[in-house]
Image (cartoon, rainbow, N blue to C red):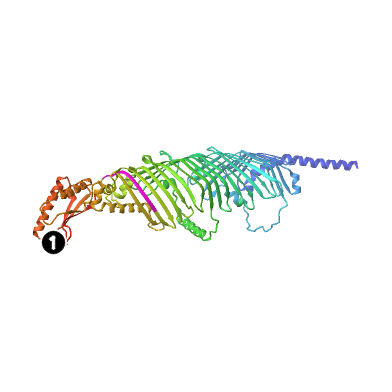
Amino acid sequence: MKRGLKITLWVIGILLAIVFVATLIAAPVAKSYINKHGEELVGRKVNVEELKLNVYTGHVAIHGLSLYEDNGSDVFASFDTLDVKASLLKLLSHTVHLKHITLAGLKVNLIQNGETFNFQSIIDHFASDTTEVDTDTTPSDWVLKFYNIRLSHAQVNYLDAQSGKQWHLPHIGLRVPGFVLGGEEQSEGGLRIGFAEGGRLSIDGNYDSHRGSYQLIAQLENFALQNLQPLTEDILTVDRLGGTLNAGVKAEGTISEILKSYIGGSLTLNGVSLEKKGAEPMAQLRKLEVLINNINLDANSYDIQEVTLEGLQAHYEQWTDHSTLDELLASKESESSESSENSENSENSKNSDNSTPMKLHVGQLSIKDCNVTYSDYTLPDPFHFPVTNLSAEASDLTLAGGNNAKLRATLPGGGHLMVNWKGDLDDWKRHQDLFLSIKGLDMTQLSPWAVAYTAQPIEDGIFGLSTRLNINNSQLDNQNKIDIFKARVGSRRKDVDPEMKVPLKTALYILRDKDDKILIDLPIKGNVDSPEFNYMKLVWKTLGNLLVKVATSPVRALGNALGMGSDNLDFMAIAPGQHGLTSENYHTLSDLATIAKSDSLVVITLEQRMPAPANDSVAFRYTMWNNIIQRYMQEQGVDESQLNITSGEPTADGERTGYAIGSEMKME
């Protein structure tokens, strides 16, 4: 009996010794095996500097692991320490229980070459060779419990081998107190990321696996937009993207209906600038703030509480073949096959698009202290038009239904702009009601446009405009009242081929009253669906027709413009037996001379009205009067090109004889 006990004790002792020795040599053996057979395990060369293993406590620690690229020399990923502690006895109850997981000093180098990443071979190594589909839908009775998960001092480097773009995330941290799959416990965790150019992202969340509900809170603090530049190089051509972003987002809902989740929060941009080397910033923005009540992706609904934009500084330039927008956006030629595929996909999308219409509501929109300059280099003279102190406000903006907004701005030369708008956004051609008022605009700012359309520059004048624009079912009705003071235009430029040949100088002269003011009613109508519809051309056409009509009106209008009586400016009567000009005739000629000298474009026409029969005696007397009239007008300083005396048909019985007075306009 004693001998049997002694043998039993020896066997137990030997077994314990074998287990103890196995424990001691397990770590070195495992380390050696991993280093020698890494390619068999993961498809890549692997090197482990130190491995510690304790099968009694379920503790594993790996120090200095490096996973190499396919070439076996460059490091793809590495870490300083991986420390894991598990409860091995829990495996007996179908539970994987990890008490803690700590990963420190992780470094990952991601390289993209076209559509392929440098980890593709690892994915291919673990890909299944079979295409069998697992049809077993029986729920697993295994429970996964991971606690105290921690990632510290991690960093990720990204390189696009084709474009040379690089992106660096130097400070990544992860904290997950508990994560459970298969049980009824709640899981919670957090993620911290620091960015190379500045900024910090923190994400905290929890998940109830029993209810399938989640809550997520994300906070982005002082994120430098420069971090995004490598990602925007295919879109924007700027050398530097300045500014910071702060954002807070809260989302909660259920995993089964994740699109119905509640999403709310805020977003603030500060000090945004788009810059190119050696040039002024293309655009700057002091602040943009967006407060979000709720976003429901399932209903395609966006409820925005408030949008505030402050301090926008921008300029837009238009050339014949490109614009500022073309310079800002990176142009990228797409392959014909890709273009064809996109076109086909777009067409299919249109045919099968049964998506919910977007619902947008903005409770309050506020725009303050903005300055925008428009420059047009397509005209004969460069056109620069700065709009400063621009502000706008609107409430309860929506895509469906009526909206209203107000806009105010300062125009060049001390002018002011005011706009009140009501209308639809989803279908602007259905209904628009806009009132616009311009006061005190320096007209010389518009000279490049006047040169382009009439070849005549504007040299002086103050412009005012009051307009009411209505669009109902694509029909435009635009009533304009123009108020101009001291308008002056220069001579016609011979180097410009204008779109309309209008005697603008004379027309403005005629339209001026004795106080040097011009008041014009200018109605504009049209169909906005017409392929030839162009609002600016329609304005100039309407205005041009008015100016032509005024400039070619009888000379009476010229007399009225000069403030003289016009009763004697239609006809200069001469009796059949009259031998010389009367004092009344000379008074009429004096007024005509004054009119002719007021504008070199004016041509006075005198059409003879001789009594019948027009015999030689009558013709001689009219020839004599013609000479007297021409000599008198020359003495008054009228250029001979501004006087045109023509013959007419003999008058009928009872008609007046003499000269019918009219006017013509000669082009400059």
Q: Can residue 308 be seen in this view?
A: yes
| In front of the other: 370 or 41 | 370
| In front of the other: 433 or 224 | 433
Q: Give the range drawn in magenta.
A: 478-490
Question: Which residue sits at x=12%, y=52%?
Answer: 625
Q: Is residue 487 in the magenta section?
A: yes
Q: Name the residue under label 1.
A: 612
Residue occupying the far right of the picture: 1
Q: What residue type is labelled 1?
A: Ala
> Looking at the picture, how far across and down is residue 507, in whole percent?
27, 49
Q: Is residue 612 in the magenta section?
A: no
| Rendering quarter of residue 86 | top right
Of helix, strand and loop, which one carries label 1?
A: loop
Residue occupying the far left of the picture: 617
Q: Residues within 10 Å of mark 1 (few under 14, many from 20)?
A: some
> Looking at the picture, how far across and down is residue 89, in whole percent?
76, 45
338 is higher (above) or lower (below) than 319? below
| In front of the other: 106 or 563 | 563
80 is higher (above) or lower (below) than 235? above
Left or right, residue 516 beside residue 284? left
> Looking at the picture, how far across and down is residue 584, in whole percent?
16, 49
Left or right, residue 512 beside residue 270? left
Secondary structure that dominates the magenta span:
strand
Question: Which residue sits at x=42%, y=45%?
Answer: 418
| In front of the other: 146 or 310 | 310
Pick the quarter of the image with the N terminus. Answer: top right
Q: Can residue 320 be seen in this view?
A: no
Left or right, residue 519 beside residue 348? left
> Looking at the picture, how far across and down is residue 122, in whole percent?
60, 49
